Image (tube, rainbow, N blue to C red):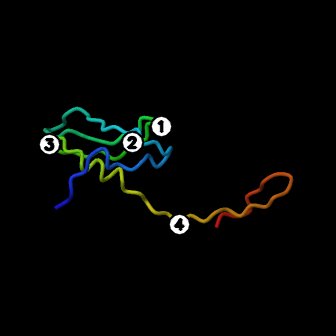
Amino acid sequence: MKSELSLKDAYPCPFCGSDDLKIDIGDEYCKRTPLKMVCCECEASGSHVYHPDNDISEAVRKWNQRASYNVPSPVVRITNKFEILASG
């Protein structure tokens, strides 16, 4: 069984770093209410989740998921201006 999560368990916004977050509750659709996490600072939002009892645990769980990318830094040559030589 998954543990219960609350708004205080949410990670800061991955875009701006703010911890000023809220749960946005949409209009009921087919007896299911969409919930999603929203950053109050930059308005980034998480995925919609549908739960008949307005349980926010899954919305917080999805907000807390972070993709892990292994993106190489571009090679930069310093001259009188910065030039990106290669990406990778």
Residues at marks 1 and 3, CA–CA distance in whole angstroms:
28 Å
Amino acid at the residue labelled 2:
Ser
Assign a secondary structure to mark 4. Answer: loop
Would you say the residues marked 4 and 1 are in contact, meaning their CB atoms lie under 8 Å apart?
Answer: no
Amino acid at the residue labelled 1:
Cys
Residues at marks 2 and 1, CA–CA distance in whole angstroms:
9 Å
Assign a secondary structure to mark 2. Answer: loop
In this figure, which residue is indicated by the disc labeled 1?
A: 42
Amino acid at the residue labelled 4:
Asn
The local crowd at label 2, few if under 14, some if 14 to 19, many if 20 or more residues have their Cα within 10 Å, is some
The local crowd at label 3, few if under 14, some if 14 to 19, many if 20 or more residues have their Cα within 10 Å, is few
- Quarter of the image where the C terminus is located: bottom right
The local crowd at label 4, few if under 14, some if 14 to 19, many if 20 or more residues have their Cα within 10 Å, is few
Residues at marks 4 and 1, CA–CA distance in whole angstroms:
25 Å
**Residue 78 placed where, x, y %?**
81, 58
Residues at marks 4 and 2, CA–CA distance in whole angstroms:
23 Å
In this figure, which residue is indicated by the disc labeled 3?
A: 52
**Residue 74 placed where, x, y %?**
67, 62
Residues at marks 2 and 3, CA–CA distance in whole angstroms:
20 Å
In this figure, which residue is indicated by the disc labeled 4?
A: 70
